[in-house]
Image (cartoon, coloured by chain):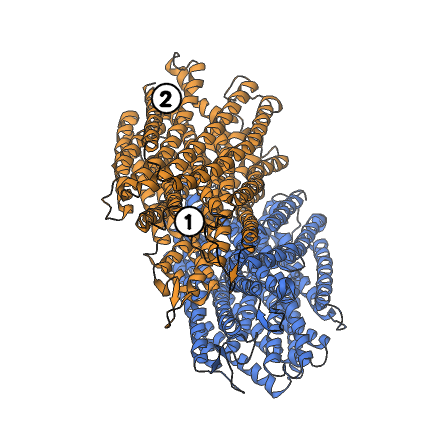
Chain colours: A orange, B blue
């Protein structure tokens, strides 16, 4: 009971601190009227999109909620081993938690975006004072989103748990009663994770399509055809592009990490319950202490992240990335200390092994960050090779980039393999029965301990990107030294965004194993005493087919995401060309009239509508496929093999996850590497952006042109399909958790 | 015994007929001296490469053979359940079959190439007479390769089986003795499949790198920079490009399909043995009849292919593809009839279900051909969408092409799922025990029934490609009507090559399940009476790690193949540029002196050396990874779970296969679609190859330029990495079959 109180208290503290950061950020200067004008346009576009997107998602979620209620309450027969007394009660809790998860996920995304579209102009204004001022504003604005997400997800899971535990009389009952009640609760609140991931899926897919359709459209006509720089106010798609950074990177990623932490917490609780039950007596009488251990460890992580964020400052001379890295190390060390404390407190004699598991998780997160840097930063060979290949043209640039993307999976896979085997072994050798799996769950919690800080760094990306755009579109011409500062932060922001993706894939991979096991534990709970699922046996045709279709889902889903960007970008290109058509030209080059101001609204409108329409197909595919395969295989089950469908769905989940992790690594890192290969050339490598002839005339460098092709191809890879795959992986876990009874 | 005789007789008949076709082709006219000169240059280059490649492969294979002998003979302990009396005997048979498989695979590749580099000039000469003459010469030349491959693989497997059966006294012994001896033999000859796939892997990887490095290099400087047409004699890399078609497409693919048929035959025999043993009495006393049924069915397929090839003729007016399709239908119908006969003869009362399985396999092969056509021919939407996307530039062309490639996996996956579940169900409902798996094995044999004809169509591709090149480089200028005919055949050849790849992936996918099961049957045979592997349980950490690493292998391997092409192409580009540097220029455009003849030899030499060097890394990765993972997991096994390593390797094999199938489909079809999108634009779509200004001046159409980028990117996809993945998948199956005892 103390544990629950502590978790709730720290969650509330996290939210309160986020509130404090909001007032701190909002009290900063908002700059000149010109800056505010740009910021207002971004704000209006972003809020309009999110409103419409949330409406679309709300309708679909409401439909799904009704369906869940009907299926659980009326279609499915009540079974003796259900965690509730009646079908209706199970339907009630599952639907309620689904709805709550969906609402909280929407709220997390919305708050993140609300703050970031207000922080961007303040960071831009702060850059007029000092780099430190801008850095702190951007990071603290990002931290609001980060803290809100992790605190809300913890509060939601712990709160729902507490409510059900209280209504069932857990607090007033005996120790034996508590041990009866508590393990059933995670099964009743699995819907929370599913609600969160359902929203996250559409938010990330829709936002991802929006951001890259606008970006590709703006770049291809603006930069390539008209030859105007990035974020130039004369580009009709520039506001849509800046809006996209917010809706894709803030809102989407916020919802993504919200659901990650929620889903993994619930999964860890299911595993902890099994651990407690398999070790009668050994773990004391406090079932809550074991089941809530993962949540306590995560709560300490929130405190660590707060310290980490407040620790960051720079003197304006060093690379701001170093300042952010210092903050990360502080967070990691404090999170490790918190983990140690939580282990000693709640796990008693067995604390050391599990503390080491948590430490392994923290180390894994560091390794993922390093590997991502190696493959996507231009200090290292992979990106330099891509730049080198650009000399022979766009085709060799693409070939090399794809090769780098495909190659980069090997190190992360080895790290994950090591982390899974290592934490399992550590758990297993703790002396407890069935503790290996709990070890991997604890490692996942360790990895997620720094999530608050990582997410703050992530949201820092779009904020500084926007700040740079605002400066460029307002005072950039007159005060190049301000633009220089925001450029520095923007480039750091690009790195932090890439790192977060590496972290997100890594945590998805580590969590995968825990979530599979939660699903299997759940199946066995439902079928207790009749059958038991001991294996996910790939050597049965139906199970193999489930696995094949899981991997196929990943390819098809990625295709739909990438295609949607191509299609929407096409429309933006047409609109920008339409607006440019009437402008005067000299030698085919547009001569912009002084004070030319394009119509930004049409592009914003086009992308908004198109992104919302195109997010539906991949979303429905992702939700429909596991259900469809489950129901199909259910039709094939025989009395000899009553769990065939559940097993086939497990294979779909597992192999889909493996394929998803690899595909996401490929897409994210290829995209990041292409992006930075272009930036590397812009620093002057291979001739730089322009070539100067002996007579002084400047011409475009074709090597840079080839690198721009790669950069454009990488856009939908790294910002639409890749991040959407993270969500897909977790959504598969939660949908199978919630719908497991349907496949029996 | 009759069965064995029949198989051997038909194999020899197939070889004899191939011999007849060789004399038929060699008796054709070899054209003008100019044509012979080009052909001789190709011949010299191809033979030099193959000689050096075979030397490299021979050294590695010899090393591996010694290793296998030592490990089996001296390191590994003899077990009571080994199929032989002593360790040394098992070592002897395994090593012998490995060596034989390697030699036969080399021979199959060599003969295919030997004939095709002699058929090309004769097909070119034949095109001066009529389209039909050229078509028949090219197809019959291709059929030599096709028949040789299928007949040799059958002869090898059946011959080895017969020899061991005879030495063990199977022919003279009682029925009971035969039932004891026969099932053990496939375990002793599994090395044959491994030897074949070891050679095939290096042949396909090396040949694939050669062909595309030369092609990309020739195109990027020749077509794009110098503006000279395809196969122009002024291009220094043109001979290397034509050589590449032979070593990559003939020799590589020949070795590939040789090992497919060999591996799948052995796998099917293992499954058949298990079926016979599980149905004591029901299947009569003739164990050979059941075990050799798959081989008999395949033997009839050889006869069907001979008829199909001889049936093809054209009147010169219709699309030659129709003529080839007619031949394919004839083959399919005859193969089905042969299947029916074999089923009735050998399976008695149970014939109908298994005949239907075979039919399902044949239908699957047809469906794969249709799906491949849909995704890669410009009559259909996917390719047209790519052409459309080229309007906005190379970046959107690439984005769309990748989306098409990722999307195209869904239909093949559904077809394969249907085929696996359907044939399993059909087998299962035959009334025999454990017959489901035999059903899928029989479906695979059905699919492979038409392999001879398909391979003839495939080798038809490089022959007509070469014929076109020879005409272009000799008489093309003076006799455009001949070039027109060879162009027609070349375009058909492109289609047939794409179809074969679809067929090869499809058969690999269908065979996968059979080969997994053979592996598990083998493990259980070795551990009989002590442990038994009942499942490949993804829900164990070590097994999950095996699965993750299997999928990772596919990505990494693809990366190495693609990267190698990029790197070698770079060297060709430099060499071509070096040769062009000294030529006079006007406005930057090269003005070739009359009678200019470049130095072809340097390019041939560069690609030869580079391809041989670069094939080593992906090859060793593919061979080393399953062994490494197996030995690593063996170190983790516990007394509770003695089969842990074997199970982890099974997961590596299965999930590696799933990832490999999807990746190969992606790479092959994206590459094919890009190729044809470019060809579609060349037919005049979106402005065609050149734009004509109002004043009559011709300029390059940038839409075509964008499509050329896609085509170039697709080259290493569809001709290096994709086909190499087919071989990788099968090699994983055979290496695990052979080395299974090591993981116990």
Question: Where, by quadrant of the figure, is residue B266 drawn?
Answer: bottom right
x and y percentages locating residue B8 in the rendered image:
63, 66
Image quarter hosting the C terminus of chain A: top right
Task: Count every numbered label the image shows and give the total.
Answer: 2
Residue at numbered disc 2 = A287
User: Nearest the camera: B393 or B506?
Assistant: B393
The local secondary structure at tag 2 comes to helix
Other residues around mark 1 within 10 Å, as few (<14) / some (14–19) / many (≥20): some
x and y percentages locating residue A453 in the rendered image:
33, 37
Residue at numbered disc 1 = B744
Contact (CB < 8 A) between labels 1 and 2? no
Question: Where, by quadrant of the figure, is residue B563 drawn?
Answer: bottom left
The local secondary structure at tag 1 comes to loop
Q: Chain of mark 2?
A: A
What's the residue at 40%, 68% (across, down)?
A697
Residue B89 seen from this side: no
Q: Chain of mark 1?
A: B
How far, Cα to Cα, is label 1 from label 2? 41 Å
């Amino acid at each position: 009971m103390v544990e629950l109180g502590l978790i709730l208290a720290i969650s509330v503290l996290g939210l309160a601190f986020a509130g404090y950061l909001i007032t701190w950020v909002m009290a900063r200067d908002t700059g000149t009227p010109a800056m505010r004008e740009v910021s207002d346009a971004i704000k209006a576009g972003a809020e309009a999109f999110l409103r419409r997107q949330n409406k679309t998602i709300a309708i679909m979620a409401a439909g799904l909620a009704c369906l869940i209620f009907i299926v659980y309450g009326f279609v499915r027969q009540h079974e003796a081993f259900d965690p509730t007394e009646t079908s209706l009660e199970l339907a009630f809790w599952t639907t309620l938690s689904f709805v709550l998860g969906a609402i909280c996920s929407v709220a997390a995304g919305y708050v993140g975006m609300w703050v970031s579209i207000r922080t961007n102009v303040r960071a831009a204004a702060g850059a007029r004072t000092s780099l430190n001022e801008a850095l702190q504003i951007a990071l603290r604005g990002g931290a609001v989103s980060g803290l809100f997400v992790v605190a809300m997800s913890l509060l939601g899971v712990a709160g729902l748990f507490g409510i059900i535990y209280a209504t069932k009389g857990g607090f007033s009952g005996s120790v034996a009663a508590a041990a009866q009640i508590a393990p059933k609760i995670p099964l009743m609140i699995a819907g929370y994770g599913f609600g969160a991931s359902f929203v996250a899926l559409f938010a990330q897919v829709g936002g991802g399509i929006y951001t890259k359709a606008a970006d590709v459209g703006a770049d291809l006509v603006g930069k390539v055809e008209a030859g105007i720089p990035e974020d130039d106010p004369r580009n009709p798609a520039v506001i849509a592009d800046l809006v996209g950074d917010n809706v894709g990177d803030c809102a989407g990623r916020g919802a993504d990490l919200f659901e990650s932490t929620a889903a993994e917490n619930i999964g860890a609780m299911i595993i902890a319950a099994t651990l407690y039950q398999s070790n009668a007596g050994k773990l004391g009488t406090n079932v809550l202490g074991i089941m809530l251990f993962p949540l306590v460890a995560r709560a300490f992580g929130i405190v660590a992240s707060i310290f980490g964020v407040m620790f960051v400052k720079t003197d304006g001379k060093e690379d701001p990335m170093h300042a952010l890295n210092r903050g990360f190390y502080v967070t990691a060390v404090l999170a490790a200390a918190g983990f140690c404390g939580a282990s000693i407190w709640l796990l008693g004699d067995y604390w050391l092994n599990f503390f080491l598991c948590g430490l392994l998780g923290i180390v894994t997160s560091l390794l993922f960050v390093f590997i991502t840097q190696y493959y996507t930063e231009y200090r290292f060979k992979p990106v330099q090779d891509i730049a080198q290949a650009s000399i022979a043209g766009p085709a060799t640039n693409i070939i090399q980039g794809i090769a780098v993307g495909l190659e980069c999976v090997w190190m992360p896979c080895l790290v994950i393999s090591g982390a899974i085997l290592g934490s399992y072994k550590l758990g297993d050798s703790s002396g407890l029965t069935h503790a290996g799996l709990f070890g991997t769950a604890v490692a996942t919690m360790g990895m997620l301990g720094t999530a608050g800080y990582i997410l703050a760094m992530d949201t820092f990306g779009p904020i500084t990107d926007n700040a740079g755009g605002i400066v460029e579109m307002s005072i950039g011409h007159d005060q190049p030294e301000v633009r220089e500062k925001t450029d520095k932060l923007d480039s750091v922001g690009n790195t932090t965004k890439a790192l977060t993706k590496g972290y997100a894939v890594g945590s998805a991979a580590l969590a995968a194993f825990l979530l599979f096991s939660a699903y299997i534990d759940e199946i066995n709970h439902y079928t207790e005493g009749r059958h038991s699922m001991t294996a996910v046996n790939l050597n049965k045709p139906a199970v193999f087919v489930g696995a094949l279709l899981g991997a196929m889902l990943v390819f098809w889903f990625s295709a739909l995401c990438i295609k949607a960007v191509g299609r929407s970008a096409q429309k933006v290109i047409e609109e920008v060309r339409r607006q440019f058509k009437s402008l005067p030209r000299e030698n085919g080059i547009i001569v912009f009239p002084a004070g030319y101001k394009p119509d930004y609204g049409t592009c914003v409108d086009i992308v908004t509508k198109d992104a919302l329409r195109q997010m539906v197909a991949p979303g429905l595919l992702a939700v429909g496929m596991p259900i469809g395969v489950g129901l199909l295989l259910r039709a094939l089950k025989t009395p000899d093999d009553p769990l065939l469908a559940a097993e086939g769905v497990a294979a779909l989940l597992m192999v889909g996850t493996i394929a998803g992790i690899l595909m996401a690594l490929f897409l994210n890192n290829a995209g990041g590497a292409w992006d930075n290969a272009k930036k590397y050339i812009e620093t002057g490598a291979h001739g730089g952006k322009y070539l100067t002839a002996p007579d002084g005339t400047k011409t475009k460098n074709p090597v840079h042109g080839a690198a721009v092709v790669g950069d454009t191809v990488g856009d939908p890879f790294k910002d639409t399909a890749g991040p959407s795959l993270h969500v897909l992986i977790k959504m598969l876990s939660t949908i199978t958790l919630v719908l497991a009874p349907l496949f029996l």
